[in-house]
Image (cartoon, rainbow, N blue to C red):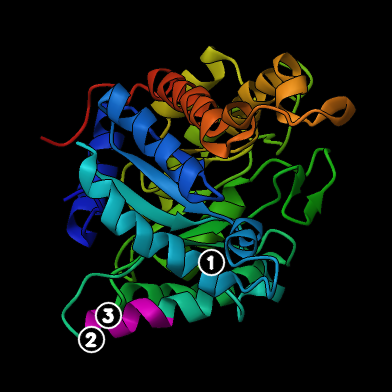
Amino acid sequence: MPIATPEVYNEMLDRAKAGKFAYPAINVTSSQTLHAALRGFAEAESDGIIQISTGGAEFLGGQYNKDMVTGAVALAEFAHIVAAKYDITVALHTDHCPKDKLDGYVRPLLEVSAERVARGENPLFQSHMWDGSAETLADNLAIGQELLAKAAAAKIILEVEITPTGGEEDGVTHEINDELYTTVDDAIRTAEALGLGEKGRYLLAASFGNVHGVYKPGNVVLRPELLKDLQAGVAAKFGKADPFDFVFHGGSGSTAEEIATALENGVVKMNLDTDTQYAFTRPVVDHMFRNYDGVLKVDGEVGKKSTYDPRTWGKLAEAGMAVRVTEACAALRSTGTKLK
């Protein structure tokens, strides 16, 4: 069962929450980065999450017509086949989808899975993300209610981002300022609108100073202890202990202590994109610099086919990214926790 069923995905998240660990959620943009992520999980003996952003899906759809749904469906179908060769379980997820892309991405993908479920099959994706962080909280949660109902009907988990994460991700930009911290009132309003599981399960991307992109430790003020306050505030009002399954966005450059605090306070999923992009590209650059007269036809020469063959440098890229995935598993304590 390399691609998680709805029941198994719920079990994965429950185990992570109870065990105080989280799954790396790895953004992929090709069959090669998919294999790199799967390889990294397998080498770490960790289950995990594979995710496709709107930009990643557009890239996957090809540059001729750049169709996001085509790209996402194609890679998901591919993943269902090739993941069978890896001795781990993964869930398929779609990353950041803002309001203006819902009709061209998440809503059609929900319909694809709804049709599959109606035929007695499992959904194509196990979870989808609605990024309403650029909207007012009222509008964000209203759309979240609609999407949660559709997701639950298709046996899918919804991820919601209720307040901004700084930096830029696929065209969605937020300033780095004091607004990057979710309040207890924000969390209570979320629970009032989306429930605490009775309307469908959802993952919550709350903000505690997170910033997408590249930054050095100390340049961003992360307050993962804030997640404990959100859990406690909602628990006090609704009587359900540790009510939220949190997602950690913008984790590049985070310290081990910050990650550990986030795990202790309910984070079950942490997104990785910037670091894995670099880990994939760095070996390619090294290969090109070392073999420039082979990958290029310099001074009228013919080059060297074995050096510019995409398989040669592609294998190096896959290996480099896989190593970064295994490192993420170790940092998030998921190493060795795969389902038996």
Question: Could you tell which of marks 3 and 1 lies nearer the N-terminus?
Answer: 1
Nearest the viewer among 250 and 19 is 250
Amino acid type, callout 3 = Arg
- Decide if residue 190 is on the left or right side of residue 331: right
> Which of pointers 1 and 2 lies earlier in the amino acid sequence?
1
Looking at the rendered image, the disc whose residue lies closer to the viewer, 3 or 1, is 1
The residue lying at 54 percent from left, 34 percent from top is: 314
**x 31%, y 79%: residue:** 153
Indicate whether 258 appears above or below 193: above
Which secondary structure class fits the magenta region best?
Answer: helix
Crowding around mark 2 (Cα neighbors within 10 Å: few <14, some 14 to 19, many 20+) is few
**Percent x, y of residue 8:** 19, 52
Q: Position of residue 101 (x, y in %)?
A: 66, 73
Q: Quadrant of the C terminus?
A: top left
Going by the picture, which residue comes out furthest to the right? 299
Residue position marked by numbered label 1 in the rendering? 71
Provide the residue designation for mark 3. 116
Q: Looking at the image, do the residues carrying marks 1 and 2 touch, with CB atoms under 8 Å apart?
A: no
Q: Which residues are magenta?
A: 111-117
Q: Is residue 245 above or below residue 275?
A: below
Tell me the number on the disc at residue 118. Answer: 2
Query: Do callouts 3 and 2 mark residues in contact (Cβ within 8 Å)?
Result: yes
Residue 295 horizontal side relative to residue 28, left or right: right
- Separation of residues labelled 3 and 2 (CA atoms): 5 Å
Please state which of residues 123 and 148 is positioned toward the viewer in this rendering: 123
Placement of 23 over or under 206, stated as above or below: above
Taking depth in this image into account, of 211 and 115 the one nearest to the observer is 115
Q: Secondary structure at mark 2?
A: helix
